[in-house]
Amino acid sequence: MGIKPNLRVAAVFAVAGLALTACGSNNSSSTATGGSSGAPCGNYKIGYLGATTGPYGALGQNMVGGIKLALDTYNKAHSDCKVSVQVFDSQGDPTKATPLATQIVQDSSIVALVGPGFSGESLATGKTFAAAGLPVISPSATNVTITQQGWTTWHRVIGNDSAQGAADAQYIQNTAKASKTYVIDDGSDYGKGLATYVKQGLGSGVIGTDTVQTGQTDFSATVTKVTGSGADAVFYGGYYAEAGLLVKQLRQAGYKGLFMSGDGSEDPHFVSTAGAQAADGAILSAPAGPAPASFNAKYKAVNHSDSGLYSTQAYDATNIILAGLDAGKTSHSDLNSFIGSYTGTGVSGPISFDSKGDIKTSTIYAYKVTGGKLDVNNPTPIQ
């Protein structure tokens, strides 16, 4: 399914100096600062697919906020030719995302998708988007196998679980000096995938493993296994709703070792779920650095809340799409080619894609809960 070439757009990246400079499919550098391609306007939208409600809605709200900031900047400069976002709330559930993907590809006004937000729904919907030729840029889905499916329209602006898992294992061994790690996952495509790469990195340092479920609230069986194992570190692959309850119950049972989890838990809701005392000292990794203060001020003015994990990635993904449209790439195939050959620097860092759609460069950071709060401003780069 193509897009009729009748949209006049000019992507505006300069948000108080936070400009995203692009080198698109024409291999020439440019900075989108406004102006017009001279083509008539159309009623076009960027879609978002992911959770905005439910137990993991906070992560999706961060992404939608980034999209809204990028579009707010553009629309203020082009009041006669606005681009909007249409949000499709999957609650992070692949079974809910699948019919929503069909709705998205049937709407010819949607020029591209920012999302899906989660790995499971990405694996469930990627074939639909690829068959329709719809360009996709995920700010957050990290499962390694997504970009091994041969979907030529799928890209991500964040490092995958292979990179994060290796960095997490390195942190546990070299920084935390832990020698006996118990690795737990939630059985999801994301959580299980990340935990697998952590186990590979730790090798014989893994003293035990267990799998729980998303939505689980009683972790007593797992807690008993951990406390009986003599583990001095626990790694959890999953999301903050369960991670918070797990560390709370571990601390209540007397476990005093390191608790570490990945980007699915790197959110203040982890602390509020666990409680400040239980969460204190936890390490939460993410293939994403903190947002610049100037970005957060702009974000807050538009969204009336602070930016969070994946806000900068969603902002950058939206601006890449707008840059392609500004370059006249208004069909699905042309816009997808532009994205694939894109090279630039956004607020989340340098961005370019390999032949599979993975970002070429990504730094993994360790965020610490200290004094009962997740310190989102001073993470430690792991690799």
Image (tube, rainbow, N blue to C red):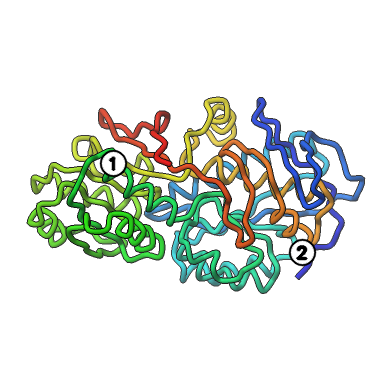
Numbered circle sitting on residue 376: none
Gap between marks 2 and 1 measured at Cα: 46 Å
Q: Is residue 238 above or below residue 326?
A: below
Numbered disc 1: secondary structure = helix
Q: Is residue 57 above or below residue 36?
A: below
Numbered circle sitting on residue 174: 1
Q: Position of residue 7 (x, y in %)?
A: 83, 52
Return the residue nearer the eye: 335 or 337. Answer: 337
**Neighbour class for label 1 at 10 Å: few (<14), some, many (≥20)?**
few
**Neighbour class for label 2 at 10 Å: few (<14), some, many (≥20)?**
some
Give the left or right position of residue 34, taking residue 92 as reference: right
Q: Amino acid at mark 1?
A: Asn
* Pointer 2 residue: 333
Mark earlier in primary sequence (2, 1): 1
Q: Quadrant of the C terminus?
A: top left
**Depth-wise, is mark 2 or mark 1 nearer the camera?**
1
- For the residues bearing labels 2 and 1, Cβ distance under 8 angstroms: no
Q: Amino acid at mark 2?
A: Ser
Asked if residue 87 shows in the view, the reply is no
Give the left or right position of residue 383, taking residue 3 as reference: left
Q: Position of residue 35 (x, y in %)?
A: 85, 37
